[in-house]
């Protein structure tokens, strides 16, 4: 029998798979010249985004996760995109890696990456959202929480003010 935590973990893993499909298709579209293939991939991205939104609703409503006390100072938006990370300070200073934005607020970002990061690590981030063509945001921030979901590390980074 599944427990509530088993369901949450299962739907988090499904959400990760949907996001990964969006990441791969979106990254591929940037490299293509064929408008027909780009158009087909954009429909795939739209479908995966719809599936992802259903899972978010399920997690928030059906499992009553929306009832948990919100601790953020500003509202977060489910904004998917690419994130380039450059470690600042500490022994790994200057190391660069890549990740993906899961959601974003004025105060921070939730991101996932194949590269492991630790609570307390500090980064310079370059954020390029898929739905904001060409615009790049640069922020400095510190990792405040980390978890592992399937083959990715997911964590929250609070921005420096």
Image (spheres, rainbow, N blue to C red):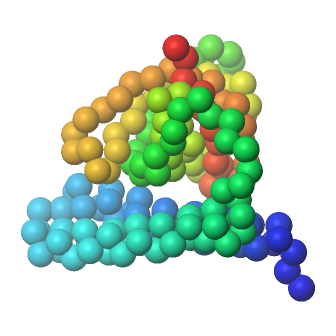
Q: Quadrant of residue 71?
A: top right
Q: Is residue 145 visible?
A: yes
Residue at 55% in and 17% down: 160
Please state if 75 lies on the left or on the right of 37 as rendered. Answer: right
Please tell me whether residue 35 is drawn above or below residue 80 in the rendered image.
below
Please tell me whether residue 112 is drawn above or below residue 108 in the rendered image.
below
Please tell me whether residue 125 is drawn above or below residue 40 in the rendered image.
above
Q: Give 158 or 92, whichever is nearer the viewer.
A: 158
Quadrant (top left, top right, bottom left, bottom right) of the N terminus: bottom right
Spot occupied by residue 73 in the image (x, y as percentages of width and height): 59, 29
Q: Quadrant of residue 28?
A: bottom left
Spot occupied by residue 114 in the image (x, y as percentages of width and height): 59, 50
Spot occupied by residue 29 in the image (x, y as percentages of width and height): 24, 61
Spot occupied by residue 151 in the image (x, y as percentages of width and height): 65, 60
Q: Give 149 or 75, whichever is nearer the viewer.
A: 75
Residue at 51% in and 50% down: 102
Number of disc labels: 0
Residue at 12% in and 75% down: 36
Please tell me whether residue 21 is drawn above or below residue 123 in the rendered image.
below
Please state if 25 lies on the left or on the right of 33 as rendered. Answer: right
Residue at 48% in and 67% down: 53
Q: Is residue 149 visible?
A: no
């Amino acid at each position: 029998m599944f427990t509530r935590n088993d369901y949450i973990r299962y739907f988090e893993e499904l959400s990760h798979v949907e996001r990964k499909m969006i990441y791969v298709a979106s990254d591929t579209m940037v490299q293509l010249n064929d408008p027909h293939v780009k158009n087909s991939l954009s429909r795939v991205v739209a479908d995966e985004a719809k599936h992802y939104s259903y899972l978010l609703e399920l997690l928030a409503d059906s499992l009553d996760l929306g009832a948990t006390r919100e601790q953020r100072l500003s509202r977060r938006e489910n904004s998917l995109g690419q994130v380039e990370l450059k470690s600042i300070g500490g022994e790994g200073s200057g190391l660069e890696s890549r990740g993906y934005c899961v959601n974003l607020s004025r105060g921070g970002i939730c991101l996932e990456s194949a590269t492991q990061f630790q609570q307390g690590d500090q980064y310079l981030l370059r954020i390029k959202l898929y739905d904001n063509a060409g615009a790049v945001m640069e922020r400095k921030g510190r990792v405040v929480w980390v978890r592992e979901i399937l083959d990715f590390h997911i964590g929250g980074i609070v921005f420096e003010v």
